[in-house]
Image (tube, grey):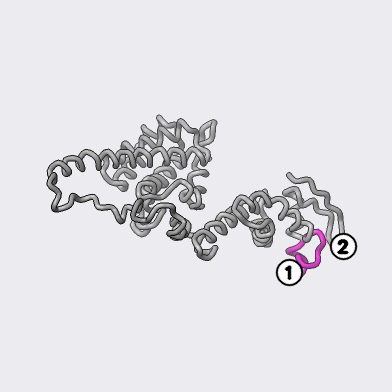
Amino acid sequence: MIPHTTTAAGRGGGEDYTTGEGLRALLARLHAEGPGAWRTDPIAAKLMEYAAEKYAALARKHGLDPWEAAAAAFDVMRTRSARGADDPWGVVTHAVRITCIAEERAQGLLCSTHQARRPHYSVFHDAERLSDRENPLDDYHPAFHITDPHPDDEHDGENEGEREVVEPAGVVTSASGAVEDAIAFVTVLGWPAQTARAAVEHVCHALARAGSRQSAFEVLRRDKHSRALLDLPGSSWTALLRALLGNPAPGIAATSAGRGILLRLLIGETLPVLLHDDDLVLTVSLAAPRKGGGRR
């Protein structure tokens, strides 16, 4: 906590807004005094200076000015959820972090902050100029690669055999890389490393046997034996399956939530992109089992 001394001034009280209880009392008083209180109350002005200092490092991490983070804090401080929260600073910090992420993504995607908050837009990579690349586009982009043998090739049969060997090897490498990335993603969000690896690998084996994500989801959802071996509560197991394999509901099959982590990694999305998906991050982190077991 950043040390800050507060004093009673003007009509305001002497709330110590650096504590959760003091912040809650100050927000309740400002709300009761009406909209003009935020403009005229000296304690409110000091609160915003404190917020700018408190979130300066978070703002710089996402390429923003500290006062942009303070503005985000101001927006959430005026809501009922902040005034009535058991931990108002926790609510404010979470909201500021989400806003900073959305602002950074909006700058990279050249879109509005509102759009950047939506997974439908945030899955895309940042905009870039073709001239920013050292190599020509056709040197690395798969859309410009020809994989079929040329009709005039004298060694069509030989090339065909080579493709049968090379292409499956590439798929295996891509799939194994997606598995490792999925394990890393789950581990970063608070899951024990051993549990994350065992759970993700078990899901992948079941997916290979079932042949489809929806079938694998239904089989694993009812697999109490595997869940017991992994020592996972039912809520954590179901949330992890939905995150890895996608939500099987027909209406969202084409969305990021419907695709799931494994498919999103296989089609080219990266860990940083997944970590910017706030709904997915929140789902996986809240589902993480406690160290001592039991439900969250």
- Callout 2 crowding tier (Cα within 10 Å): few <14, some 14–19, many ≥20: few
Is most of the magenta stretch helix, strand or loop? helix
At which x and y percent is residue 129? Answer: 46, 60
Marking on residue 35: 1
At which x and y percent is residue 258? Answer: 38, 53
Which segment did they paint magenta?
30-44
Instruction: Tell me the quadrant of the picture where the N terminus can be found.
Output: top right
Residue 32 among magenta residues: yes
Residue 10 lies left or right of residue 237; in this view the side is: right
- Residue at x 43%, y 42% (from the top left corner): 240
Q: Nearer the viewer, residue 270 or 157?
A: 157
Quarter of the figure with residue 46: bottom right
Q: Classify mark 2: helix, strand or loop.
A: loop
Residue 45 among magenta residues: no
- Residue at x 48%, y 52% (from the top left corner): 277
Residue occupied by mark 2: 10
Q: Classify mark 1: helix, strand or loop.
A: loop
- Residue at x 36%, y 59% (from the top left corner): 251
Residue type at tag 2: Gly
Q: Nearer the viewer, residue 49 or 80?
A: 49
- Residue at x 75%, y 48% (from the top left corner): 19
Residue 253 lies left or right of residue 194; in this view the side is: left
Quarter of the figure with residue 216: top left
| 124 w.r.t. 226: above or below | below
